[in-house]
Image (cartoon, rainbow, N blue to C red):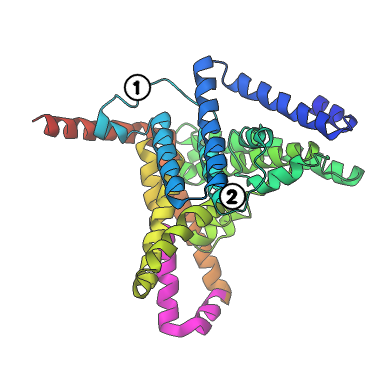
């Protein structure tokens, strides 16, 4: 990468830099998906977004948009092999061996792309910039979820973002710190979290409760530091994804700090449209409908993270957490008014108690991201499927 970053500024014509990015993107995807069937399936999935975008640019119809999103979601669920499919179709839909790289992030970017085209916010339909956006090596594997408009602005220039030697040093320092977070801090937390029972007399379960979330944080935030810094060397702005999430005072605040690009995507493309669709015909119920919208949005975010049953529990807990935070806020307003809410939020002792409670709830949700939870819930999920199939057969 450093060799490529050193050569890249020497490529003066824009078309040459764009060609460099195209070749690098193609090579990266091919290395990730060397099997022809997987490569063609991934290409077809991405191509459907561009085709739908062209159609919606020509005819911006809500029905066509809804139909495409439904079909895309079905394809995504089948390709991801969600466990719940066994409840309705046995092993038929999950027996394939396709494992497509970056599919979850491509799925969200694709919905953003077609929705924004339909709303007239995207007008440049260049297929090369679209495919490089969707398969961007810096964001393909684990995000952050970039918006097409910003990528397209950078695509039109592709000038390395560090403007001087000082900015370059800061960028390289961030890249180094990202590597340290992933390779040293995250791995240390993971080793300590699952160390043999009784190490140094410390309660292992308590260590795991706190240190596994620390591993997830350092691993993910370090990865984001690496890709944000590396992309800057090639003239691409990758959005920030974290803002001190463990200082959040409730689960709504937590999700505006943790995986921020996911949270903002959920806000713009799930929560707000769902709430508006329900609140307009039933305005009197709007204060109550907001809880359901929060729950559904965060539940779907949890399920999006993975195809196994443990992610369903993860989504349910986060959905309940954000709904409870909104319910508590409304209860304070009903009792003390907006002024009382402001006083409550500014109270330092309450703020720290809320932060500690939020940290513990976030750690609780991450129990269901641990490997043993995946195995245990897979076992019970399979038992449930067997019971359902047995009842249906009887």
Residue 180: which disc? none
Near-viewer residue (72 or 56) = 56
Q: Is residue 358 visible?
A: yes
Q: Residues within 10 Å of mark 1 (few under 14, many from 20)?
A: few
Residue that protrudes farthest toward the top in the picture: 35
Q: Is residue 20 left or right of residue 319?
A: right
Query: What is the quadrant of residue 88 in the picture?
Result: top left
Q: How many neighbours does mark 2 have within 10 angstroms: few (below 14), some (14-19), or many (20 or more)? A: many
**Where in the figure is residue 254, as x and y percent of width and height?**
53, 57
Q: Residue at x 53, y 15 (%)?
A: 36
> Which residue sits at x=44%, y=53%?
298
Magenta span: predominant SS is helix
- In the rendered view, does 385 fall on the left or right side of 73? left
Residue 325 falls in image quadrant: bottom left
Residue of label 1: 95
Residue 140: image location, x then y, percent: 60, 34
256 displayed left or right of 20 = left
Residue 261: numbered disc: 2
| Secondary structure type for disc 1 | loop
Figure check: 354 above or below 284 = above
Q: Which residues lie in the magenta part?
A: 321-345
Residue furthest out toward the left: 394
If the image is split into quadrants, where does the N terminus sit?
top right
């Amino acid at each position: 990468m450093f060799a490529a970053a050193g050569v890249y500024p020497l490529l003066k014509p824009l078309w040459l830099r764009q060609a460099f990015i195209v070749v690098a993107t193609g090579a990266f995807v091919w290395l990730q998906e060397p099997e022809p069937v997987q490569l063609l399936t991934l290409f077809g999935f991405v191509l459907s977004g561009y085709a739908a975008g062209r159609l919606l640019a020509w005819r911006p119809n809500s029905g066509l948009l809804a139909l495409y999103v439904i079909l895309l979601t079905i394809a995504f669920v089948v390709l991801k092999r969600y466990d719940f499919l066994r409840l309705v179709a046995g092993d038929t839909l999950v027996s394939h061996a396709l494992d497509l790289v970056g599919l979850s992030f491509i799925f969200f970017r694709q919905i953003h792309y077609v929705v924004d085209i339909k709303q007239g916010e995207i007008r440049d339909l260049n297929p090369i910039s679209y495919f490089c956006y969707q398969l961007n090596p810096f964001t393909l594997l684990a995000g952050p979820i970039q918006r097409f408009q910003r990528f397209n602005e950078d695509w039109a220039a592709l000038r390395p973002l560090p403007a001087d030697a000082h900015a370059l040093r800061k960028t390289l320092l961030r890249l180094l710190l990202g590597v340290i977070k992933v390779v040293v801090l995250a791995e240390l937390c993971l080793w300590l979290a699952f160390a043999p029972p009784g190490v140094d007399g410390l309660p292992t379960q308590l260590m795991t409760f706190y240190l596994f979330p620390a591993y997830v944080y350092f691993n993910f935030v370090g990865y984001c530091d690496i890709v944000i810094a590396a992309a800057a060397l090639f003239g691409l702005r990758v959005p920030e994804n974290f803002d001190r999430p463990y200082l959040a005072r409730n689960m709504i605040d937590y999700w505006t700090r943790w995986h921020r690009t996911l949270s903002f995507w959920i806000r713009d493309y799930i929560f707000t449209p769902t709430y508006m669709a329900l609140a307009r015909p039933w305005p009197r119920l709007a204060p109550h409908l907001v809880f359901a919208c929060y729950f559904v949005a965060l539940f779907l975010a949890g399920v999006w993270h993975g195809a196994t049953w443990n992610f369903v529990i993860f989504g349910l807990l986060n959905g309940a957490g954000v709904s409870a935070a909104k319910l508590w806020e409304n209860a304070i307003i009903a009792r003390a008014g907006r002024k009382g809410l402001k006083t409550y939020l500014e109270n330092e002792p309450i703020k720290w108690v809320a932060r500690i409670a939020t940290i513990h709830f976030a750690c609780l949700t991450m129990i269901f991201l641990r490997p043993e939870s995946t195995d245990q819930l897979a076992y019970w999920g399979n038992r449930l499927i067997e019971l359902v199939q047995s009842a249906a057969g009887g």
